[in-house]
Image (cartoon, rainbow, N blue to C red):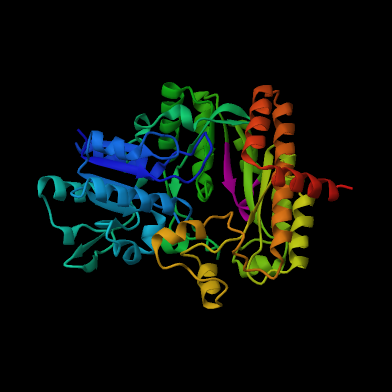
């Protein structure tokens, strides 16, 4: 029997996928409280969804949504549930719901919404629906409807992450989340913190986490690492936190514990160039860190200021210089097509990125993301219009949607640049795999890349790649 089914909608078309940590933590809390719970991840579980829910009908179904392509699948599944199991209560949560709670809740296929962190609101709602305990009006972070009127309750303080149980990894087919990286063939993602203390204008964090960062203690991170090593033979970890080293002392303690315990792991994380620290990076390298990815974003001082990045071109150059000196591989993540950006400024970014000596250069074409200052700016300037219906917003937020261009640069130039760096990354990843004598990854990587990208991408990327090196 299942009391609660948690659903992760379809967002990507390739395996391995990324672990849905929001649902994993909610499931762990529910199970700890005696609620029978299952997870259906549409990215890794390919059974017929209707047959799956009818076989063992849950009483509550929770669906987590981001502002992206997964919206379409979430709406489709919610409507399907409403048709085949009309008495089941449907709860929407996640980042998109947190930003647009009323807009999501107004749909007939949604009974409740959870705003911000969902672990305890879902548990309290389950107690109310399953056992008649408590009151809807007193469940913080909850939104509900009564006689077609929408109610949004008060917001509770953020969770102390160390108080949470281990994520419910056993509810998922873990073999479908194990990635091959140049530094290890058995890598999974780990989320060890929530929020971010910075205020980048393109990011949703200000609206969702209010610039409040909170993280697991170093001891709790080690506990998760050791559990995954023991139970799933994981050898590498990709820390997927927005800001893994927002608390540098936590990273130092984490490294010290790795060395003290003699753990044999390889790992990578995201960072900011304005917090790069040579002494800490030396310790990270000693403790098994192999790769750090930085949000370079732009080579234009004007654009860096506009997006409130709080870093300079000198910060950027220095961070990559430190990585080279320490022996850490580095990645440069950057955007093109930002509001008011010119072709001259994009070329400044390209010149900077090409000069950094980064081992990976990850490019994205900017799309306005809800909850961010730039999203509001673009709406005000009428650079685009947000569809009203939730089901229409999925394709709209797809980063592959070339119809959205809020810059002063032609779309073809943006796409050509993006394709070039995609192609470049294939070359660079193969180089790193060769350096680490990871021949299995080389074969796997080439095969998956050639299947993932179409001929247009391959030819466009290769042409641009060669043009920029002749």
Residue 276 among those drawn in magenta? yes
Q: Quadrant of residue 174?
A: top left
> Residue drawn 69% across and 23% down?
439
Considering every residue shown, the one lying at the far front of the view is 83
Please, is residue 276 above or below residue 101 in the view?
above
Considering every residue shown, the one lying at the far left of the view is 132
Residue 231 visible in this rendered orientation of the protein = yes
Residue closest to the eye, 39 or 86: 86
Residue closest to the eye, 42 or 252: 42
Horizontally, residue 299 falls left or right of residue 61, namely: right
Specify the segment rendered in magenta: 268-277
**Where does the image place residue 155, in percent across and percent down from the top left?**
29, 61
| Quarter of the image that includes the N terminus | top left
**Where does the image place residue 414, in percent across and percent down from the top left?**
70, 59
Residue 101 among those drawn in magenta? no
**Where does the image place residue 83, in percent across and percent down from the top left?**
25, 49
Residue 209 visible in this rendered orientation of the protein = no
Number of numbered markers: 0
Q: Quadrant of residue 401?
A: bottom right
Residue closest to the eye, 323 or 410: 410
> Residue drawn 40% across and 52% down?
65
């Amino acid at each position: 029997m299942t009391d609660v089914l948690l659903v992760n909608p379809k967002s990507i078309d390739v395996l391995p996928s990324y672990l849905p940590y929001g649902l994993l933590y909610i499931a762990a809390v529910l199970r700890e409280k005696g609620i029978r719970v299952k997870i259906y991840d549409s990215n890794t579980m390919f059974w017929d969804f209707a047959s799956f829910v009818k076989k063992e009908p849950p009483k509550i179904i929770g669906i987590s949504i981001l502002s992206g392509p997964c919206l379409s699948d979430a709406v489709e599944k919610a409507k399907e549930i409403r048709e085949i199991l009309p008495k089941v209560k449907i709860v929407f949560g996640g980042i998109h719901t947190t930003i647009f709670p009323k807009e999501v809740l107004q749909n007939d296929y949604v009974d409740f919404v959870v705003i911000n962190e969902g672990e305890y609101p879902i548990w309290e709602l389950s107690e109310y629906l399953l056992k008649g305990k408590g009151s809807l009006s007193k469940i913080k972070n909850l939104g509900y409807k009564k006689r077609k009127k929408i109610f949004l309750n008060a917001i509770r303080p953020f969770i102390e992450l160390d108080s949470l149980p281990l994520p419910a990894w056993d509810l998922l087919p873990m073999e479908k989340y194990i990635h091959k990286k140049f530094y290890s063939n058995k890598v999974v993602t780990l989320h060890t913190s929530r929020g971010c203390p910075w205020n980048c204008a393109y990011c949703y964090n200000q609206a969702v986490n209010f610039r409040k960062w909170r993280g697991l203690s170093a001891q709790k991170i080690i506990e998760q690492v050791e559990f995954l090593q023991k139970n799933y033979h994981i050898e590498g970890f990709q820390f997927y936190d927005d800001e893994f080293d927002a608390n540098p002392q936590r990273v130092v303690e984490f490294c010290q514990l790795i060395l003290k315990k003699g753990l044999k792991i390889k790992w990578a994380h995201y960072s900011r160039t304005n917090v790069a620290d040579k002494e800490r990076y030396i310790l990270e390298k000693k403790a098994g860190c192999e790769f750090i990815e930085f949000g370079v974003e732009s080579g234009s001082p004007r654009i860096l200021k506009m997006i409130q990045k709080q870093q300079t071109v000198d910060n950027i150059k220095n961070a990559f210089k430190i990585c080279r000196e320490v022996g850490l591989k580095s990645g440069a993540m950057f955007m093109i097509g930002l509001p008011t950006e010119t072709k001259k400024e994009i070329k400044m970014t390209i010149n900077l990125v090409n000069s950094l000596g980064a081992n990976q250069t990850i490019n994205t074409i900017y799309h306005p993301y809800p909850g961010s200052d730039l999203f509001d700016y673009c709406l005000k300037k009428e650079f685009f219009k947000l569809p009203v219906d939730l089901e229409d917003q999925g394709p709209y937020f797809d980063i592959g949607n070339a119809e959205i261009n809020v810059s002063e640069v032609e779309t073809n130039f943006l796409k050509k640049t993006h394709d070039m760096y995609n192609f470049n990354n294939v070359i660079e990843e193969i180089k790193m795999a060769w350096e680490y004598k990871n021949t299995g990854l080389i074969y796997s990587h080439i095969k998956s890349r050639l299947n993932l990208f179409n001929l247009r991408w391959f030819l466009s990327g290769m042409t641009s790649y060669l043009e920029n090196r002749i």
